[in-house]
Amino acid sequence: MRRHIVIGFAASVLSTPVLADDSHAHYAGLESRDIATLSESDIADLEAGRGWGFALAAELNGHPGPAHVLEHAEDLGLSPEQRTRVEEIFTAMQVEAIAAGTVFIAAERALDIAFSNGGLDAAKLETLVSAAGQARSNLRFVHLSRHLETLEVLSAQQVERYNDLRGYTDDPCAQIPEGHDSEMLRRHNGCDR
């Protein structure tokens, strides 16, 4: 009986480091970040007022964003008045997004520092998490609200053309590009559902 216990204990000890290594590998190297939750490119994007994917709910549901409308201004046939208005929307978005991004970065930094310094209690943690969540929410609103404003400037035909230009109306199931695994592409795009 004792022999079985010893063998079982030895097996569990020998397998533990392997399990521990696998569980930590995903975050290895991130401990050297200035802010644990944000990469250098995340911080650069936020400081520059870039969208950071916050407006996908609008973008992918037929509400064009001002930056991409300006990129495609000629193909969309924007009038001078439309271009001016979209430029104003974009400029206002940039100013507000940079300010809101700065607040979000600071909130994430405060949360990171609090854990780094130790002595954090639940009440302080709740305050910090709420501040970071509100900052993120405010930043997302800045981006999403500009998609609403931009939609008001465009005609239905321009929105349709925008979606074509951005590739949102292409049916990935209709034709498989040459050189792609058709079975895998169909499975990933849910073509057979």
Image: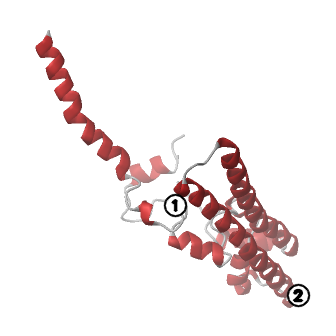
Residue 70 position by quadrant: bottom right
Q: Specify few, some or many for label 2: CA neighbours under 10 Å numbering under 14, 14-19, or 20 or more.
A: few
Along the viewing direction, whichever of 172 and 66 lies nearer the viewer: 66
State which mark lies toward you, 2 or 1.
1
Tell me: residue 83, above or below residue 107: below
Residue at mark 1: 36
> Where does residue 78 sit, x and y in percent of width and height?
80, 84
Q: Secondary structure at mark 1?
A: loop
N-terminal label among 2 and 1: 1
Q: Which residue is mark 2?
A: 81
Q: Residue furthest front?
A: 119
The number of callouts visible is: 2
Measuring 55% from the left and 53% from the top, which residue is drawn there?
A: 115
Q: Quadrant of the N terminus?
A: top left
In the image, 130 versus 145, the foreground residue is 130
Within the image, what quadrant is residue 49 found in? bottom right
The alpha-carbon separation of the residues under discs 2 and 1 comes to 44 Å
Decide which of 174, 184 is in the foreground and name it: 184
How crowded pointer 1 is (Cα within 10 Å; few <14, some 14-19, many 20+) is rated as some
Quarter the C terminus occupies: top right
Q: Position of residue 148 (x, y in %)?
A: 83, 66
Q: Is residue 18 left or right of residue 97?
A: left
